[in-house]
Image (cartoon, grey):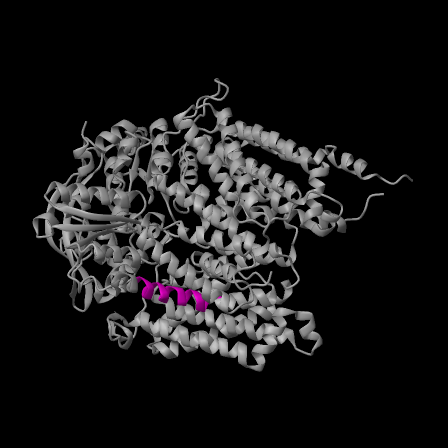
Amino acid sequence: MAVDSPVAQLIRADRLRPIELLPWVVAVAAYFLASGYLPLGSQIMIMILFALSLDLVLGYAGIVTLGQAAFFGVGAYAAGIYAVHVSGEPLSGLLVGAAAAAIVGAVSGAIILRTSGLTLLMLTLAITSLLEAAANDATPLTGGNDGLQGVAINPLLGLFDFDLYGRTAYLYCLVVLFIAWLFVRRLVHAPFGQSLVGIRENVVRMHAIGTPVRRRLLTAYTVSAALAGIAGALLTQTTQFVGLTVLSFERSGEIVIMLVLGGTGRIYGAFLGAAVYMIAQDQLAEADPVFWDFWIGLLLVLIVLFARGGILGLTDRLLLMMPRRR
Amino acid sequence: MKLARLAAAIIAITALAPAGAVAQTVKLGVIDSYSGPMAGVGEQMDRGIRLYMQEHGKDLPPGVTLEIIRRDDTGPNPAVAKRLAQELITRDHVQLLAGVIFTPNALAIAPLATEAKVPFIIMNAGTSMITTKSPYIARVSFTLWQSSYPLAEWAAKHGIKKVYSVVSDYGPGIDAEQAFTKGFTANGGQMIGAVRVPLENPDFVPFLQRAKDARPDAVFSFVPAGKQATALMKAFGDLGLRAAGIRLIGTGDITTDEELQNMGDVALGVTTMFHYSAAGNRPANVAFVKAYKAMFGQNQVPSFEVVGGYDGMAAIFHVIRAQHGKIDPDRTMALLKGWKDDASPRGPIYIDPETRDIVQNEYLRRVEKVNGQLENVELETIPMVKDPWKVLNKQ
Amino acid sequence: MEAIVSILFLGLAYAMILYLISVGLSVTMGLMGFVNLAHGVFAMAGGYITVTLMSRYGVSFGVALLAACVAVALLSVVLERCLYARLYGAGELEQVLFTIGLVFMAVAVVRKIWGPLPQPIAVPALLSGQINLGFRSFPTYRTFLIAVSLVLTLVLWLGIERTNFGARLRAAVDNRRMAESLGINTGQLFTVSFALGSGLAALGGGLGADILAIDPGYAMEYLVYFLMVVAVGGLGSIRGPFVAALLLGIGDTACKYLVPQLGAFFIYLAMIGLLLWRPAGLFGRA
């Protein structure tokens, strides 16, 4: 039997398996069946995109960061300021958000990625906090603590108005997420993505085989920042408002929790984690908003103790336990 | 026999008729902060709502029920608040929206209120321009200009010539600073300095030291009510500002009733201007405080957020009663404009028909020890203050 | 001049509290290699226990502090043996998430029991008001804080540098394997130093209740400051957090006084600068 070459393995992994279409089927079905929940659906998809961006740096490249909200926030504000001062056209606004976040990602990455561990963690935190303080101060541009208002978004493609029921917003987020997903999927199944995994697992080895480690990490960081920026821009455009909390430490922490909940380093962990967290929060927080923190905390503790790979890790183990088909 | 049956049928039908045939359910969506760092404040507002419902639930017109749907915005989260408002409107089909602690949340919801034509009664958020953002917004709480501006006028007329301002760096703080500055300078006073304190800041010492260096007659301050106010008070004491002959004045947020006991005697003599004090001896307030303690505990003290929730419900009940439960958005706004309540715990209030904002008494208070407890004793009343920012900015 | 003295003095009190709370974190992170973000919970617990003992049971200040210290130290031993020990080999992300989960749980429980409002602290009459130190008066309590913290720091330093236990601890931090092969029971060392660090944090929380208000948000809100002090100071070091706390605490206060517009930025800019200059911390091992 011929041994699979690495390239052949990658190509095989990249082939679309039927189950990978499940999230899209669910999303489209939800549009028709759960029309009262479309605003929630849009925000879930935005969080999924945000979590995907984090998965790239945290799950694949192994960079532990508490500062992903910096890029989300920069994208959100860039798109908002663009809409207020330049043009309400949404698609160009997305690009502006992505570009602004990518620049911040590239610059900050170049400065801080040579550190690691607690130092890197604190640096990511510091950058986010600085941006938050700056946004609070720059009131004429960002609306300061009150938030940026008057973000009027033109109809999408000149045809589809952003309506009260959130229908246009939902489909908009769905399409953007789909494109982003295709992109990330291709990226991680390419040698680039594999090199990130290599860097995460054994960086010394990667240096030894001549991989330009710093450059790869910086590229991953920048791409991830751009994706997070798109998520932020989407939030601005669908809510037509930018609040200071897009740059908060809570936002960074929350997205890490969502990703870990679903399972890191597996793309679909982002889908599952964000969806489960947001739906649970919506339903359970209503029942007991004060104690919601407790359950999340307990969940985290249990995941780390017993279910390291998150939900997907658990399902993997369950599948292993099932009798094999011949 | 047949006649009796017919008579019975007629009586039965006429008995049913007056109720307007169908029972009406009015749905009210309340967006409040039940979790997150300001959960305490959100809880206060909710208590006001609950107290009012307990006292007046039976005052609804016959056949009309009020369904309150509560949603948690988890803090200053405008994206969440907007989504909740959207869901309340499109999924739960509420006819009225109420609540909201934070300005950004209110601002995010405003366009929805306009687009969906859902009256939005603000029970807390205090930045002046909020009511200009939608013709369907009415506010029953307060604005920072309403307390800071009259305070400035009072200060200028009572021997305070130079003031240094120390406020928290966010919407309400900036409003307070601008309001005080405007009122003070318009009455011959001199602002010798101003500093804005970051919202996340455990220590007021360096900022108050700057104030002390400038040697003002008084320091004007606004910080969020609660532990920041206590920190401010402690720093004021630690730095010996009072010994240096500097007074502390501010809006009532810096000496709220429920936090006052934590501040200790350093708070004595602090003069504030506010629309509510639990120590007010109006009969309506005495009864209100008594009912509050009965419902929530004898050692509990109602704060201004409680009153905001309480009076907001009074306004809502008014529009429900006047329309017999059939809520029409424009008619509701017409009813709210000019709505008066002389029996509010804070004194007589009404909603200005021009601006849809609250008009109320402002009380000049001083912290004094009464029966061993610190209280905000009301000294003077400035009647029926309209929001000065809107008055000054009238087009 | 007078203003600067005030600033330095009051900023020093703040810095000392940060130090007391953070030094335990530095040791456990340096020694155990364990990212314990729940450290703030020990300080918070210390604060709550102190305040509750004083206000509800009329216990005196000193006794309440001591009791809080001991109680939290014991609690931390239980936590360490039952939960933390399982994660010693785990990756950094796991430790971060686990301890953050503990923080969430602790915060929710505290909020449920004590409510969301901050706890009133009644400083003993002896320690309130102003004290005349000869050249000018200072707030008595802050003076007391500085004095106590300096004494504790000295005791700590002597303990680490001059005792057998301290020597073993330093050896274990430097090179765990080697220390073990010399017969040092590092597991036991971990537990004891973890308890010490947590007890110190509890002490810091109780003492500092006047400056860092005791409310359910404590563990999360001030976590960033503790982490900053430890990261800048250098993991595993005793001196590091001291210098870092001084730099950051006094620097922060001074900047807010001199250039208030930059008040919110200074501490983050300073941290970024210091960490980029010395990524392992001022006194850390590279």
Q: Is residue B323 visible?
A: yes
Does B195 sit above or below residue C154?
A: above
* Residue sitting at x 69%, y 72%: C178
* Residue sitting at x 36%, y 27%: B115
Q: Is residue A324 toward the left or the right of residue B23 in the image? A: right
Query: What is the quadrant of residue B337 in the picture?
Result: top left
In this rendered view, identify the residue nearer to me: C200 or B336.
C200
Does A24 sit above or below residue C177?
A: above
Question: Horizontal and vertical percent for residue B245?
Answer: 15, 61
* Residue sitting at x 64%, y 41%: A215
- In magenta, the rendered stretch is C7-22
Q: Is residue C155 toward the left or the right of residue B345 in the image? A: right
Query: What is the quadrant of residue B384 in the picture?
Result: top left
Question: Horizontal and vertical percent for residue A211?
Answer: 72, 43
Q: Quadrant of the N terminus of chain C?
A: bottom left
Does A307 sit above or below residue C71?
A: above
Query: What is the quadrant of residue A241 in the picture?
Result: top left
In this rendered view, identify the residue nearer to me: C225 or A42.
C225
Is residue C6 inside the magenta stretch? no
Residue at the farthest front position: C1
* Residue sitting at x 38%, y 56%: C252
Question: Horizontal and vertical percent for residue A260?
Answer: 60, 49
Q: Is residue B61 visible?
A: no
Is residue C16 inside the magenta stretch? yes
Dominant secondary structure (helix, strand or loop) of the stretch shown in magenta: helix
Does A287 sit above or below residue B227?
A: above
Residue at the farthest top position: A159
Numbered marks: total: 0
Q: Quadrant of the C terminus of chain C?
A: bottom right
Question: Horizontal and vertical percent for residue B304?
Answer: 25, 50
